[in-house]
Image (tube, helix red, strand yellow):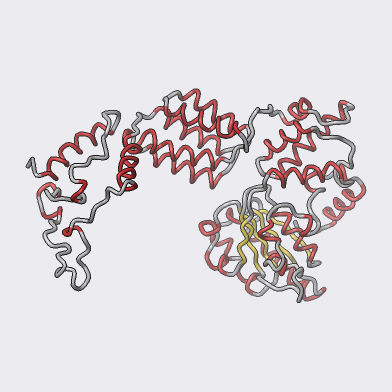
Amino acid sequence: MEPDLFSAAAEERRERDPASTPLAVRMRPRTLDEVVGQQHLLRKGSPLRRLVGDAGGGRTGASSVILWGPPGTGKTTLAYVVSKATNKRFVELSAITAGVKEVRAVIESAKRQSGGYERETVLFLDEIHRFSKAQQDSLLPAVENRWVTLIAATTENPYFSIISPLLSRSLLLTLEPLGDDDVRGVLRRALAEERGLGGALALPEDSEDHLLRIAGGDARRALTALEAGAGAAAAKGEDAITLETLEESVDRAAVAYDRDGDQHYDVASALIKSIRGSDVDAALHYLARMITAGEDPRFIARRLMISASEDIGLADPTALPTAVAAAQAVAMIGFPEASLILSHATIALALAPKSNAATTAIGAALEDVRAGRAGTVPPHLRDGHYKGAAKLGHAQGYVYPHDVPGAIAAQQYLPEELVGRQYYEPTRYGAEARYADVLERVRSRLAGTSE
């Protein structure tokens, strides 16, 4: 927000009483070297390093930066570090609560600061995807004239959520989810450093593992949970944050689940097998275990998409679109709301009629090709659009299906060596029964044995 007497007083209070400030704010990195993860953005000579002058030769680069990544990956932190490193005035706005009026006020103030005090301004605009096109348009003059250094953050794909003129004038930096080792480093720094917990409490390994599961790659969530656990432990007079105390303070039970080990694959396998077996209750149980353990929702969505084709196929042609829509929605929304979408898709797939005909069909076709049973493409199916093709007999004798009744021409499509080979064997389950009837008629027409 724009600095004023109240925010200045709050800053003084934080300096006198650090505990009044949330742990996640206190532990915010002060330099790029303290930032965890995002090494692809922090390497020597990177655009971000050049922006703060770490690459030598002064500060260079774009006057507008868009940070795109999941929550808790350091978007606000990077904006703060840039302002500190460049000694610029830092103003933070959220697109959730601010509008064009607030943005214009900051820009006018930035112009006065630049002209009167020769001090530039970093405007950090969080959740920029919530701004309308007209609201985003209001930022263009400030970006073009470099009245402010705009750093905008978004959790949604900027190619869909940010207007092209602003995107083309900005440096787009993609932040990756933090790994467990990154979050572990953040937790241990918060435990040890004076601005954090100052070594007052120990964190046993099982408690640390539980925090990593809770965090799901979100450093802010991990620090918030750690702070809650530390407060509960201090209230009990304990010198360590036990798993029991941590569970009580964050109201979330520990789940035996190792995202990098056997449990990861065992629970995922159980989810898919429960869907295949049409046991919707078991499927929801395993889904809940994966969600509670902090599994990447994109991993779950990918498994559901595979299941839709592997185990359902044309028995329910809506299964795959449902799974794909769920995957797209999960990528846009994230947890906690993504759990609703994953539940929706899981229930739909578990209760859908089942068929593995699509799976066995491509398996049989691949087996033939890999065994060398390929053959040459029949001459009448070959490309006839280039000069000389007719002399080679290519495309000659081809019957255009739309020219015959029923749009099915009795002609050979498979290579000579594979004539009569049938890969797709539909079941009579669900909607696939209709395909079975259609296929029987189509194969007869192709063979010329029926009218």
Instruction: Residue 85: name its quadrant.
Output: bottom right
Question: Picture coordinates of residue 265 (x, y %)?
Answer: 55, 34
Question: Is residue 215 at all visible to an observer of this figure?
Answer: yes
| Residue at position x 57%, y 38% in the image | 337
Q: Extreme front residue here? A: 372
Is 185 situated left or right of 178 in this image? right
Is 172 situated left or right of 28 in this image? left
Foreground of the two, 245 or 123: 245
| Residue at position x 37%, y 34% in the image | 312
The quadrant of the image that shows the N terminus is bottom right
| Residue at position x 58%, y 55% in the image | 129
Foreground of the two, 388 or 297: 388
Is 198 situated left or right of 404 in this image? right
Q: Extreme right residue here? A: 16
Is 449 situated left or right of 238 in this image? left
Foreground of the two, 379 or 346: 379
Foreground of the two, 244 or 16: 244
Question: Picture coordinates of residue 442 (x, y %)?
Answer: 16, 41
The quadrant of the image that shows the C terminus is top left
Question: Picture coordinates of residue 26 (x, y %)?
Answer: 82, 48
Question: Picture coordinates of residue 145 (x, y %)?
Answer: 66, 75
Instruction: Residue 285: name its quadrant.
Output: top right
- Say above or below: 358 vs 147: above
- Say above or below: 56 vs 357: below
Q: How many marks?
A: 0
